[in-house]
Image (spheres, rainbow, N blue to C red):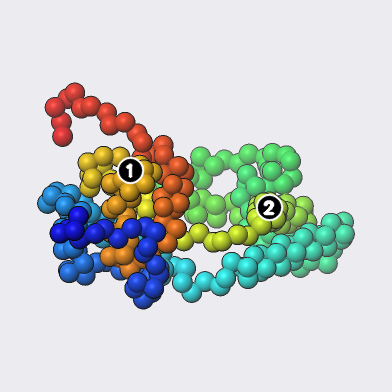
Amino acid sequence: MSAEKQPRTLETTKASDRPHSQVFTFPTPKEWSGLVRDLKLEPAQEHELRLTLRNVDEDLRNFRMRFDDREPRKELVRRLKRVAKALSALDDEIQRWHKTMTDFLPFDTLETIGLTMSYSAMEAALNEQIPRRDVKGEVERLRAGDAAVRIAEIEERFDYQRKAIGLKRGPELLAHLIESINRPIKSWLELDRCNHGGRPSNVTRDYLLIRLAESAREILGDKPTTTANGPFHRMCGYVFPACGLDAEGLEKAIERALKKHKSMFWKKQVKNTDGEP
């Protein structure tokens, strides 16, 4: 291969080869020409690779717009714990003053508690069915004035009943509401206790790997494999540097990605017997 450009191996490509190595950038025209030449791509294969990288570029831009300004995960978890603690404290206070809450809470507050809950949520909180009302008749009366009646308009017709239930059973409804909000938060925090840290995943690298693996059949003519220096490895060895990403540790990352998503990449192609493309 003396007369041919040597492919950049996964072991030798480092982050220092290009600044901002973990920010995906679409290859420049010069880099693109080099990719097509080095991978010996036919026009159809070149089109598939270009389309894949354009989609990756767009998806990662949207991802960065959403998450670049977010606080670190540790801080977000700390805040979530404080919210859970505050909700638990509120629940304790509700349980403590349960019997007298209807005496000291303003009537407007009790009515609002009723208005914030659906009828199904009320029945779950109270463990009993709410007496039926003539819903069909109300809907027909509303439709007489406007055929495109909204659900909110139907609910408004029964606001008086929800307010009445709030005035009478507000503490029970509020306790159920707080517990329902806090339950999934506490479950998440309990699961997070099993998270002992470790090196965070490289979203840019992993996402590019997945999208390249998904398109491997169209770009390379075959499914992606974990074979060292095989076609898929070789393509990644060229694509990553051209997109401004380092390839350090990429070989193991490829193995993890293909193993995790093998049901997606190893599907056998079904032969088309209908004559359709």
Residue at far front of view: 2
Q: Nearer the viewer, residue 89 or 232?
A: 232
In front: label 1 or label 2: 1
* Amino acid type at mark 2: Cys
Measured from the top left, where is residue 17 in percent x and y? 35, 72
Determine whether 225 is above or below 43 in the image.
above
- Quarter of the figure with residue 274: top left
Residue that carries the numbered disc 2 in the rendered image: 194
Q: Is residue 171 left or right of residue 28?
A: right
Q: Is residue 115 visible?
A: no
Measured from the top left, where is residue 224 in percent x and y? 33, 43
Q: Residues within 10 Å of mark 2 (few under 14, many from 20)?
A: few
Residue that carries the numbered disc 1 in the rendered image: 224
Residue at far left of view: 43
Residue at far top of view: 273
Q: Residue at the spot x=51%, y=40% of the render?
A: 136
- Quarter of the figure with residue 221: top left
